[in-house]
């Protein structure tokens, strides 16, 4: 099969012919319909996410069709040819996180596309049918993006929802592939005013089209003041940071109000300036790591109801280096999905 291989940190992807994998006991072979190009893979490429073993086939946002079952995987509700969405936060299945329904917290390097081989290829092996959800009418290319670009901000927004009482504001930093779904979840699920911060005017324009009430350029000297003024008296009850550099975290830490929450999603490696008088009283800071399988079901249900706008670009696998070059330079308007 064709696969886009990353042979070492810093290298370009190389399209190679490698043996099509055989599904082992309990496993399922998926023919990839689409695999989303996530900014996280830029962090892998640059070595900012350590621990990935090379050579490797990345690609953790996947949907497609069941090609074949390994021994014992058949007869569990799926048939060969079924269109399926792949939940990628695979874990051991036995620890308290997995059994508690938060399998994505088990071990990042069990995730498909981080440890096991991912979907920048014609086929990938999924370790269990429990990670498959029927596509049920969704286009596999769009559904691929929903498995991370939409699931991750959905899970982040849910962490913020208890704080977002009427009158309060939410600040979303970074309206790219993930952030554009984040804006929509905030508008769909919360009563909060939505303030979007992005350095790129085109992304701010898109955010306004998706319902953002106010947009701010963080390079303005008075960006924090613009945010506080827009939020008004009830303040910023939640900040969602989809960038994660020192300056975005400092901005978020500076505007989050008392009892508010700062949710870090971006993996750019910055630090949060936490000290008693630098953050508002009793504000909470947390990371948000992908999402749960149940949350993915919820996202898919919202998509099927027609209430999510997806800005998907389709590209052939052979265009993968160009796609990641454009992602690195902020030229992908929404999400790019690779179609083998
Ligand atoms: P993207 O490149 O599509 O979007 C990034 C957006 O941030 C762009 O709109 C860009 O203009 C904007 N931006 C860049 N610098 C900025 C700044 N200083 N201030 C404000 N906005 C700025 O990326 P993506 O695929 O949406 O991923 C976003 C981040 O989320 C990445 O770091 C990625 O690794 C991470 N991620 C985390 C998880 C998780 O589970 N925590 C899951 C998926 C992705
Ligand atoms: Zn991702
Ligand atoms: Zn586990």
Image (spheres, rainbow, N blue to C red):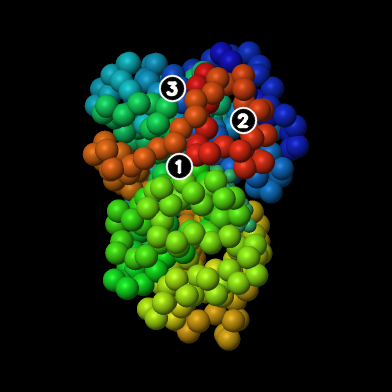
- Mark closer to the chain start, 3 or 2: 3
Q: Residues within 10 Å of mark 1 (few under 14, many from 20)?
A: many
**Callout 1: CB less than 8 Å from ligand 2:** yes
Q: CA distance from mark 3 to mark 1?
A: 15 Å
The residue mark sitting in front, 2 or 1, is 2
Quadrant in the rendering for residue 137? top left
Q: Nearer the viewer, residue 86 or 211?
A: 211
Q: Which residue is mark 3?
A: 33
SS at mark 2 in the image? helix
Q: Residues within 10 Å of mark 2 (few under 14, many from 20)?
A: many
Q: What percent of the width, then of the height, locates residue 300?
A: 31, 39
Q: How many marks?
A: 3
Q: Which mark is residue 323?
A: 2
Q: Which residue is mark 1?
A: 148
Q: Nearer the viewer, residue 272 or 103?
A: 272
Q: Residues within 10 Å of mark 3 (few under 14, many from 20)?
A: many
Q: Is residue 103 above or below residue 112?
A: below
């Amino acid at each position: 099969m064709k696969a886009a291989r990353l042979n070492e940190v810093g290298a370009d992807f190389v399209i190679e012919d490698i043996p099509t994998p055989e599904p082992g006991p309990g496993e399922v072979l998926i023919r990839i319909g689409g695999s989303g190009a996530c900014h996280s893979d830029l962090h892998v490429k640059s070595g900012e996410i350590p621990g990935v073993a090379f050579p490797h086939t990345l690609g953790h946002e996947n949907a497609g069709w069941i090609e074949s079952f390994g021994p014992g995987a058949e007869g569990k509700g799926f048939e060969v040819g079924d269109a399926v969405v792949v939940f990628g936060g695979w874990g051991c299945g036995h620890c308290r996180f997995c059994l508690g329904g938060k399998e994505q917290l088990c071990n990042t390097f069990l995730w498909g596309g981080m440890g096991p081989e991912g979907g920048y290829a014609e086929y990938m092996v999924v370790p269990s049918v429990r990670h498959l959800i029927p596509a049920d009418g969704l286009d596999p290319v769009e559904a691929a993006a929903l498995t991370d670009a939409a699931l991750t901000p959905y899970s982040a927004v849910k962490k913020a929802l208890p704080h977002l009482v009427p009158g309060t504001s939410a600040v979303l930093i970074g309206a790219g592939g993930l952030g554009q779904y984040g804006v929509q979840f905030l508008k769909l699920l919360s009563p909060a005013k939505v303030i979007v911060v992005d350095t790129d005017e085109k992304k701010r324009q898109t955010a306004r089209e998706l319902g953002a009430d106010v947009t701010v350029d963080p390079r303005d000297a008075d960006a924090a003041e613009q945010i506080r003024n827009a939020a008004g008296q009830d303040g910023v009850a939640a900040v969602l940071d989809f960038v994660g550099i020192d300056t975005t975290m400092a901005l978020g830490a500076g505007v989050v109000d008392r009892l508010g929450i700062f949710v870090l999603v971006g993996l750019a490696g910055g630090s949060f300036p936490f000290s008693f008088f630098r953050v508002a009283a009793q504000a909470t800071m947390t990371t948000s790591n992908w999402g749960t399988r149940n949350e993915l079901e919820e996202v898919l249900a919202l998509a099927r109801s027609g209430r999510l706008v997806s800005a998907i670009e389709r590209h052939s696998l052979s265009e993968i280096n160009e796609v990641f070059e454009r992602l690195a330079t902020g030229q992908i308007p929404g999400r790019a999905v690779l179609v083998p």
